[in-house]
Image (tube, rainbow, N blue to C red):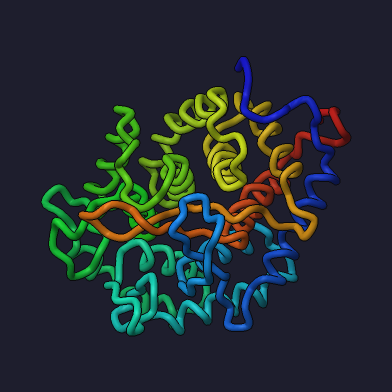
Amino acid sequence: MRSVDVDSRAIPAAEEVRAAFERAVRFLLSRQLESGELPMHVSGDRLMRVSRRDPTPFATTFAIEAFRVADTGDVAGAIRNAQNFLLGEMEPGARWRYWRVRPDRAIPADADDTACASVALRGSGTETAGVLAANRETLLRHRDPAGRFYTWFGVAPPRNDVDSVVNANVARYLGDGPATQGAIDFVIDLLEHGREENSHRYYVDDLALYHAVARAGATVGRFEQASRLLAPRILARLERGDVAGSDLLTALALSALLRVDGVSSEQPRRALVERLLERQGADGGWACEAFYAGPPPPGPLTVWFGSRELTTALGVEALGLFVRRPAHPFTARGSPV
């Protein structure tokens, strides 16, 4: 690889990476609300220079993912609180919507929130597992003729849509089986033919799809096989330099590479780690950046969603995967194992 969009000359020592990771975990713990929710913001500006709080259960699913990767005694209570928050937001039929029903925000329940919340609640008890089984039929009823999952429950096209990241997330939840083959075929076909751009209505970058597919590889065997397609795409993005300056995209790229690629991307992964360490705030968090947008079709995107807490959850996931690998590549600055 000729170049990447981060300065790879300074290689972080193992203790530096772990210290940064632990600061980020402490930041997340300190920012989790008493209710268990992870704060989220909304803005009319894609750069989110001005934003306001926007309560939603969706961001909390990423906090649970991050805390699970952290896997320390400090986070057990945070996971329970976050899961209790999600259970409190659950609607009949084990469905979730982005905003709880309120006068100023009318929005239907959807496949993405439902799938991500269901994955986040796994392992929280056998009683919960029984409750979650109720949403499977709802998800399966909301497929198009090709077997791809629609985003919204109870909404007909053209105000409904098929989003590649949503389909990857639903496949991750439901697993690899006859009911998800249409969704899996859809995502793999996009990757094999390089058509992922504009395949997602809501997520602002293709790296969101790569990250979702990489995470889903644990439960979807065909995604695990297709993951060979992801590393070259991500490495090409780094070489072009179009991830530079984005904490969120850096975290997504690192997480995906750690899940799907071996030693061939070791130098870029080191560079991505260094970039996260360089850009980490003194409080342990990273910048607020837009991860996804709205509203639903057919109109243009006019609002963007993100928060420092969400970016930091993705950073915790990425650094956690890095420091918890079977063999950490750094024993001292510049000295590979």
Q: Is residue 329 above or below residue 134?
A: above
Q: Give the residue furthest to the top.
A: 2
The residue most toward the right is 332
- 170 vs 290, left or right, is left
* Location of the C terminus (image quadrant): top right
Q: Residue at x 41, y 44 (%)?
A: 209
Q: Is residue 142 placed above or below 31 in the rendered structure?
A: above
Q: What residue is drawn where x is 45% and y is 33%?
A: 230
Residue 164 in the image: x percent, y percent?
32, 47
Give the x, y percent position of residue 35.
58, 83
Q: Out of 124 and 273, give the one closest to the viewer.
A: 273
Residue 126, position as x, y percentages in the image: 46, 79
Q: Residue at x 31, y 37 (%)?
A: 188
Q: Is residue 166 left or right of residue 74?
A: left
Residue 14, percent across and down?
82, 42
Image quarter where the N terminus lies is top right
Q: Nearer the viewer, residue 129 or 232?
A: 232
Q: Is residue 116 above or below residue 131?
A: above
Number of callouts: 0
Camera sees residue 217: no
Tell me, yes or no, if residue 315 can be seen here.
yes
Q: Is residue 163 left or right of residue 251?
A: left
